[in-house]
Image (cartoon, rainbow, N blue to C red):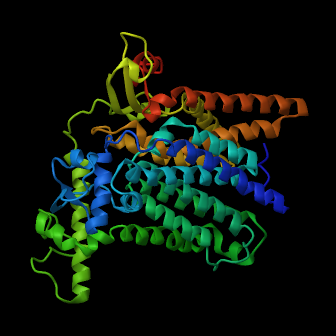
Amino acid sequence: MTSLARFSPTSWSERAWGWVGPLGVALLAFGLRIWRVGKPRILMFDETYYAKDAWSLLQHGYVQDFTESANKEIENGRTSDLMTGDPSWIVHPDGGKWLIAIGEHLFGLDAFGWRIAAVVIGSLTVLVLARLVRRITGSTVMGCVAGLLLAVDGLHFVMSRMALLDVFLAFWVVCGVACLVADRDWIRARLDRYRVVRPWQLLAGVSFGMACGTKWNGIYVLAAFGVLAVVWEVLARRRGPADPAIRRSGWIGTTLRVGIPAFASIVVVAGLVYVATWTGFLIHHDAYEARFGNGYGEYSAPWGAYVDKPTPGFLGETRDAFRSLWHFHVMTFDFSWSGLDNAEKHPYESNPVGWLVMERPVLVEYQGEFPASECGATAGSSCVRSVLILGNPIIWWTGVLALLAAVVAWVVTRSWRWGVPVVAVAVSWLPWFMSTDRPIFSYYAVAIIPFTIVAITLVIHEVVRTAETPRHRYVVWCVAGFYVTAAVVAFWFFHPVLSGEIIPYDTWHDRMWFDRWI
């Protein structure tokens, strides 16, 4: 099977539709996500951490502990005198929380304010995914199909309406991968040069840095796609037009000449961006030292024990700030890997082995005390309100098959296109198997579903491309249209339990297909 032809727009119309289509799908996603996003007006699930952390960043520049009654006071409209003044032991960097803080700055500390950033970022993820698939397949239609499937996925929909960090992680990961795919095309027109500024690699570094600055899981994607970007270019240079310098350098020399600049453009930039997300900590490191101690318990920096007294001068202050940041990381990593071993079980925790088939979705809100008149239920019945983080079954269940097909196609064809979803899903999913001894949740897979959709659209596109006759292509497009329609209908069917609508109990129960979904 030959590789797909590269997409090279030849007219303004093609270029325009390449943006109009994905933008239209992204606007649809935005409309779906922003509708009634301020309800329920409570802190759902882990919003109790990140919405409040973001507010503390706005008020003080670093995260402080909140009073025990803060949740009720916030839900009642109070926005002051909520914090204790002590720095909080945060377990995630501040990158995603600062984005939540932008919404709170614009709209206040209420449900709409702490969720609007997720709505915007979730919608932008639809746009970036559509553009990524368009570039991979060379088809604007396929790009729009990918964006539409993400727009109507229930898991991504709910996560785009909550002040949790994972949807921000997913956005930056998709951006980073999209930038490296764009760089792959960009450098192929410049294979006669080594020393060129790589704008797409730099943007990938920024994106991956923000991913790591949101949740540390981003480092796996950074590592995998950093290596993949080097492999793509080395193969292109070795297989491209003969260059005496390249031939003389050999495989190792070519890898070094490609890999070292790529490391600087991607990994070093990502590291700088990651450190920048800790700016609030670095400025206020003395507050953390006052609470946790200069040495953060028994830990010490590799360059020596932490001094008890601050080092005078700007350079000394800077060194103390970074030493403090190092101690904080050591303390937090140690807690993450061993301190949670005996953590209390959560009723909605799940093993990653079942994430791809939605074996255990997460119920983040349920109220079953509404009278029947509230939703038009029959006499003697009742009304309920729930928010369930549940993926679209049509997309997720067929997505597993598409991923298996992508693995086979990658092995058989060795086409880089199939490697994109396979590698992205692998590094976003498999590392979680190292954390099964602590509570983890299926909604972490929100970083997986964009690349599952990439696999789905690649399969559709390949079947269309290899259809031998117009009649065959017509049948394939009809089946693809039926598939997309089924996904939209499934989203509509589950929408009431995704969005917190007040519905009859029987209507809610009809959507709980399995006991593990309750």
Q: Residue at x 34, y 33 (%)?
A: 365
Which x, y percent locates residue 22? 67, 51
Whether residue 255 is visible: no
Location of the N terminus by quadrant is: top right
Residue at the farthest left position = 308
Q: Residue at x 26, y 75 (%)?
A: 283
Q: Is residue 220 left or right of residue 80?
A: right
Residue 243 or 30: which is nearer the viewer? 30
Q: Quadrant of residue 216 in the image?
A: bottom left
Q: Is residue 281 above or below residue 47?
A: below
Location of the C terminus by quadrant is: top left
How many numbered marks does the figure carry? Answer: 0
Q: Is residue 357 left or right of residue 287?
A: right
Q: Quadrant of residue 409 in the image?
A: top right
Residue 234 or 403: which is nearer the viewer? 403
Residue 389 or 71: which is nearer the viewer? 71
Q: Residue at x 45, y 49 (%)?
A: 167
Residue 452 or 113: which is nearer the viewer? 113
Q: Quadrant of residue 276 in the image?
A: bottom left
Whether residue 433 is visible: yes
Which x, y percent locates residue 382? 36, 17
Q: Is residue 14 above or below residue 253?
A: above
Q: Residue at x 21, y 66 (%)?
A: 327
Which x, y percent locates residue 213? 39, 61
Residue at the farthest front position = 373
Which x, y percent locates residue 386? 39, 30
Residue at the farthest bottom position = 313
Q: Is residue 197 above or below residue 480?
A: below
